[in-house]
Amino acid sequence: MGFNLLGLLEPGALAFFAIVPALILAYLARERPRQATVSSVLAFRALHVMRGQRFGGRPRFPWTFFLELLVLCLAVLAMARPYFLRRGNPVAVVLDNSAAMQALTPAGSSRMAGAIAAVDDALEHTAGAGEVTLYLTAPEPHPVGGAMAGGGAARAAIDRTIAIDAPNDPAATAALLAQLNADGHLGRIIFASYRAVATPVPPRVTPMVIGDPIANYAIGAFALSRETFGAAALHARITLANFSPATQTLRVTVSGDGKPIGSAQAIVAAGAATTVEFPNLPPANIYRAVLDPADGFMLDNVAYATGSAVRAVAVLFISPTPADGQSLGAIPGLSVTTRTPAAYTPRDLANADLAIFEYTAPKELPALNALIVMPPPGDPVFNFAVTGAPRVAIAGWPTTARLTDGVNFRLLNLRAGEYFAEHPWMQPVVTGDGGGLLLIGQRAGHRYVATGFNPFPYLGRGNLPMSILTLNMLGDLAGFGARSTGYHTGEPWIVPAGIKAITLPSGRRVTVAPGMLFSAATAQGVYRLVGAAGVATPRAVNLADLTVSDLQNAPPISIAAAVAEPGTAAASIVRAPLAADLLIVIILLIVAESIVVYRRRRMLVAQ
């Protein structure tokens, strides 16, 4: 490692050397004592004029003057921030800490342990290794601290690295490697990962492929849904994948709140995936799925889901008879807020998934799906033309439509109602002798259903045909049956309103604020979102990434060709700052002067 000439980062600070003449003048102007033998105090006073020499005589500088002059010059030089230009060999270490690095090697150790050992060995045998900068790839590429000494400090930081449960982004990792490769100041780039680097490999990049391809079985997704209103049980769909060279029988067991509640198995071909279903899972807060047989990558053999992920549908019920809406509270998966027409405002729709208008109609088109029950004639929004009837009768209905599926209309007792005339954009699904009885249409991206009869109050089994029709209509408007697959490790999410803290799967509690971006979900498991009242809502976070689980086929990373910086040589030129060294020398000189002066004074006092 060679050194070149000295340079200054702040050459303007050399102007402070103008203080040096001031120090000389101060020494020349000060009174310099002389030794004189006197027989009395009177004689000493008479010789008072002889105590000093006049300014301008032959200067006699003590050794302390030269020491203080040196300290002053060194201080000014330190202010100028001097440095040496030297030829160094800085090293960038890019260490893959993604989920796939948890997989075991045939020796029984993890890929991460093998990567750390390989990097440590490479640093130890790198000739003239200078500063080392460590980068991790997951959940996104980022440096760890700053540049470290190439010896024990760097290896200690590398040895503390652990693989997290989140995948990395291959494109972002490739961009980081390309950026480092384009930096002409780096002498070497070490990349340790289970992914190889595509040829041609840049000369300064040292790729280390850790771990051979291994067979793996994985859970890809754990999705919950409630297929219909009124059903307390949930429907689970679990994706199973076989990343091995042979067909395999995979078995998955599901537990709810720690109790086994179901199991299923499937024969999965090599390199294929399939879905197993659990149509009637009993209610539970937390569901856990475990896959057999075991393999060398256990992270994707377990997945979590939460019952709270199947969110309750919020219904806004506007009616002069709010009790009709309150009867809907008996339906699982439904929460109801009632309003009278006088109290209703369009702002109430902001917290609802669908709206029901009974015996009334909105004054503007609702910006969400809505059910209109027996609307008054002449409303300005939907322009319904209705004809009242003391008793309505059904004349025709389809047997395969989603709204009428499973409904025995012969058993319906509709009582009094109204018939709809032909509507400009809503089509009749159920008709009677006097016109339409159930209309459906779409406007501005939202669905609307109108009925000429009243299905409320909801009576459940007390009026089963009408209850089935009501559940069909609400389910269609709410989009019921949608699946929730939870959240993925490494993906940030917005903290919901009312949440003040989040408890991680490790048990550590993190204080948060509503609306902030939560990016600490890097471990698989159940996170508990704590509200202001102390109520915790569980949220499942899984790896659920079959591209990561495919440990037999890991596409290599391509590094873009480097564009050489003008004036950069093959060897790295780095600045070695000297300001800190100069400050240390200044402190040592001041301490030495103080010690010498102190000892001389003690000797004079002793005499």
Image (tube, grey):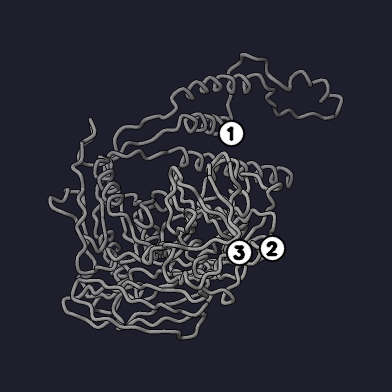
Q: Residue at x 48, y 63 (%)?
A: 394
Identified by mark 1, the residue type is: Thr
Relative to 516, does residue 272 appear above or below in the rendering? Answer: below
The residue tagged 1 is 64
The residue tagged 3 is 456
Q: Position of residue 298 (x, y in %)?
A: 34, 76
Q: Nearer the viewer, mark 2 or mark 1?
A: 2
SS type, badge 3: loop
From the image, which quarter does the N terminus lie in?
top left
The residue tagged 2 is 323
Q: Nearer the viewer, mark 1 or mark 3?
A: 3
From the image, which quarter does the C terminus lie in?
top right
Which of 606 and 386 lies nearest the eye of the viewer? 386
- Pick out the residue farthest to the left: 200
Q: Earlier in the sequence, mark 1 or mark 3?
A: 1
Q: CA distance from mark 3 to mark 2?
A: 9 Å
Q: Residue at x 66, y 44 (%)?
A: 598
